[in-house]
Amino acid sequence: MRTFFSCLVLLLLSLSCSKKKETKPNIILIMGDDIGISDIGAYGGEIETPNIDRLANEGLRFTTFYNMAKCNPTRSSLLTGLYTGGNGAVHLANLTKQAGYTNIMSGKEHFDNWVPDYCKAEQAFDHSFYFWATTEYFLPPSGEFERPFYLEGKKLNAQDIAFEKSPMYKTDFITDYALNWLDEIFVKKDPFFLYLPYHVAHYPLQARPEDIKKYQGKYLEGWDKIRQDRFDRMQKLKVLPDGAKLSPPEGSLNKFRGPLKPDYTDYYPWDSLSKAKKDSLDLEMAVYAAMIDRMDQNIGRVLEKLEKQGKLENTLIMFLVDNGSCPFYSNKIPEVQPGPSNSYWSLRSTWANLGNTPYRQYKQCGHEGGSHTPFIAYWPNKISPNTITHQPGHVVDIAPTFLDILNIKYPDSIKGHPTLPLHGSSLWPVFKGERRSEPDYFISGLEKFRMFRSGDYKIVRLNGGEWELYNIKNDPTELINLATTLPHKVLELSELYERTQNGTKRISPKSFSTP
């Protein structure tokens, strides 16, 4: 009898331990805006990003991760798992809510027209503070942007925004709201999903003076030298696909991005510039770097909060970017130097080309410079530290990954609509260090700049022109256009792409594995 009770006690203890191990993880999804892959320290940049680097060094880095090459399509696909859709789309927060999570969003909201209203922040999240598309960084605004902020779906005037550090700066008060809501959740002890889409480093270039000061003078070496240095570090860090080479420098070839002028869109050697011009350009890049630095400082605030509350160990944190670096020209640029609240300066193509090292082209484009950005996944005791994968992923893969992590089924209907099949597949096997079955295809870029990748080959076009063809495995920086050499491959991929657009070839949800 004594032996029986001893065994029973051991069994109950075992079940108790197993239940503890099965505690649902908190999930944090952090997004940067208009940042090139090499702008992050963990991917070879000289900008100080120690907190993002920590996530990378203690987690997993993808060398090839795709977005939709522009703010709104990336957010639409990221949060629904669909390249395009409509009624029947399921927001990530619907999935976490189904699993018993409290959901928080603080930051930028920007969707394509196909995203249903029920996916908007105030309907998807328990708590939300957000703004639509582009707003200034310093508040109250000085006149260029008059788009409102929203708190729990209600319009909020600038003077009513809560903030801790003066003067008001958007990256800081976005984090303030998130941290205050986390305090509420810690009391309730529910698992939480925090979506933290920062606006950094989108136009306009505005930053705190103390952050700018850290970087002024560091870019006087110029984009040619620094781009080579970044490439060398990327090679040493092994964060490039095998066979990647440094592409020749090039300006923006986007005929639809404007208003534009050669000083902002064309490439020219750094050594051809006057000292005064170099000083001005050094400041431009210093402000851009300062904005990324400030975002990283705020990510550090989140990590510190989690550590103090003992939550970090059971939290999956993912960091990504919505598209590559962006050359964009505004008529306001010549009036005020970059940095202060009344400046509407933007990054030019030569600095954006540096950010997208070693790849070609920029935001909006399906070429790798626009569609290929950092992705980091951190989860102590689940994801092996300081690991790198060359398996490609895409923002549409996040939704099926959530299903795996949450150990739930994709719903059959939502808001009275049958749900739309997901277009990606789970990254959980990759997180575990395993190989996953690669999705049939990846799509990115705006329609006139579309890319379509299937297997080792990729077609992509510029300005609505003819398809280019690249063997993306052998030529990851798109230096050799094979379109005239392999016309049958162009035809094969273009026909497959058209079938996906006509709805005749969709990827159904995969079978999900349990973490």
Image (cartoon, rainbow, N blue to C red):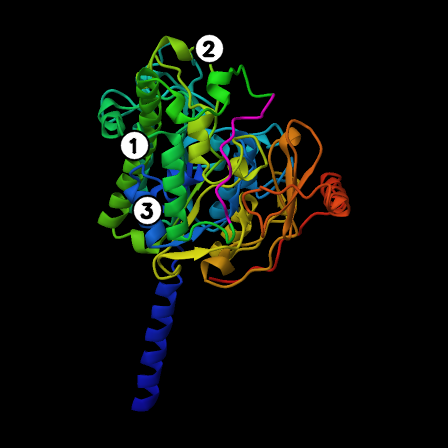
The residue sitting at 46% across, 17% down in the picture is 263
Q: Regarding mark 2 in the picture, which secondary structure is present there? A: loop
Q: Regarding mark 1 in the picture, which secondary structure is present there? A: helix
Viewport quadrant of the N terminus: bottom left
Q: Regarding mark 3 in the picture, which secondary structure is present there? A: helix
Above or below, comparing residue 432 to residue 363 in the picture: below
Magenta: main secondary structure equals loop
Q: Earlier in the sequence, mark 1 or mark 3?
A: 3
Find residue 53 and name its label: 3
**Magenta-colored stretch includes residue 458:** no
List the residue tagged with mark 1.
294
List the residue tagged with mark 2.
331
Q: Where residue 303 appears, x then y in whole percent?
A: 28, 45
Q: Give the range drawn in magenta.
A: 244-255
Discs 2, 3 touching: Cβ within 8 Å: no
Q: Where residue 349 appears, x then y in whole percent?
A: 47, 26
